[in-house]
Amino acid sequence: MSEPLLDRRGLLRAAAGAGVAGMTGGLGLVLPSGAAAGTTASGTARAALGPAGFPGYRYIGTPFDKASLRYNPTDELIFPCVRGMYDKIARPLGRYHLYYAPHDRPGGICLAYGDSLGGRFTEYPGNPVIPNVWAPHYSVSHVSSPHMIWNAAERRFHMYFHGENTTTRLAVSADGVNFTYHGTVLTTAMIPGSTETSYARVFEHAVPGLGNRYVMVFMGVTGGKRKIFWGWSSDGRSWRFDPSPLVSPGGDGQSDLSGPSLLKRDGTTYVVYHGNSGNMFLTEVGDAFDREVHLGLFHRALAGAPDNGRAAAPSFGTDGGVRYMFYEAGQRGGSTIAVARAV
């Protein structure tokens, strides 16, 4: 299954593999021109153990050709979220849905679908499934950073997204394609002194003593610096938030952090996120979210395409016992969605 929930143990880190863009690999992914999947420029596979015993991921391609997309208003695609649909609803578009978005005006929450996490995905022809103008609910410059969960109690999908960057919103769906607007779940007013609250991901995780079912990790800007914050909820709709940062950038030698995701391994909980260097880092926060143990580099961005020195916003999934990481690859202004496979 593809949901990166906390009971998906052994989710892994990504490490290198390189190249430059244009041909199709054996699994149907779009691969760099002149390079084979999972190899460096010299043709030698690279993988390394990460902190806390997390093994490596190797870049294998992109899920679609960005240049061929019908909806691509900014040529910048960010924040992938991959979800297994085959065990949630009857007759899905594909076994897996991949959500992503352009950034900046006008944005728009987009959908692609496929039957294998290691294969090609097809753009949904009705993109965007959530636009930046949704009368009578809102009209904003852009919406972006989609993250969807399956709310088993409601038997509905919950889609979290931002627009503007000060506001995280929630829409609900029975099929992952057609959505009903719920409202705002997070604003800067809920984090004192913040000027931005966005890039939220939600996971099932009960924090001892809080009586919650879900946690949210997100980027907040305070004092001009981007940090990782968190909140908790019993139903995924009403939220409470800790006003203090969960993870601050200094412990990683960074000035700014963003794009957090949650991982579980060996009886404890971690947050993985990217820093302003372009690399991903790992911090143990514990099951009670009462720790901040910086563990260092989680994934080093490829110097060449598609990363070009920046890898961010990971989303994890498993297909046929093989683990994958979808991530945002490339410098801002020209980023795309990339796929790495556990080694």
Image (spheres, grey):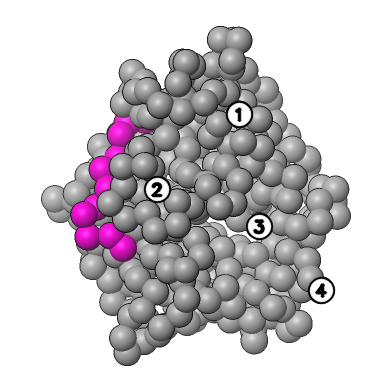
Q: Does the magenta stretch include residue 83?
A: no
Q: Is residue 122 magenta?
A: yes
Q: Distance between the residues labelled 2 and 3?
A: 19 Å
* Residue assigned mark 3: 258
Mark closer to the observer (2, 1): 1
| Residue 255 pos. (x, y %) | 81, 56
Amino acid type indicated by mark 2: Val
Residue 127 occupies which quadrant of the picture? bottom left
Which of disc 4 and disc 1 is earlier in sequence?
4
State the residue in front, 287 or 76.
76
Q: Distance between the residues labelled 4 and 3?
A: 15 Å
Q: Is 134 positioned to the left or the right of 312 in the image?
A: left
Q: Give the range drawn in magenta.
A: 118-128
Q: Is 266 positioned to the left or the right of 83 in the image?
A: right
Farthest residue toward the top? 43
| Residue 16 pos. (x, y %) | 62, 26
* Residue assigned mark 1: 304
Which of disc 3 and disc 4 is earlier in sequence?
4
Q: Is 262 positioned to the left or the right of 234 in the image?
A: right
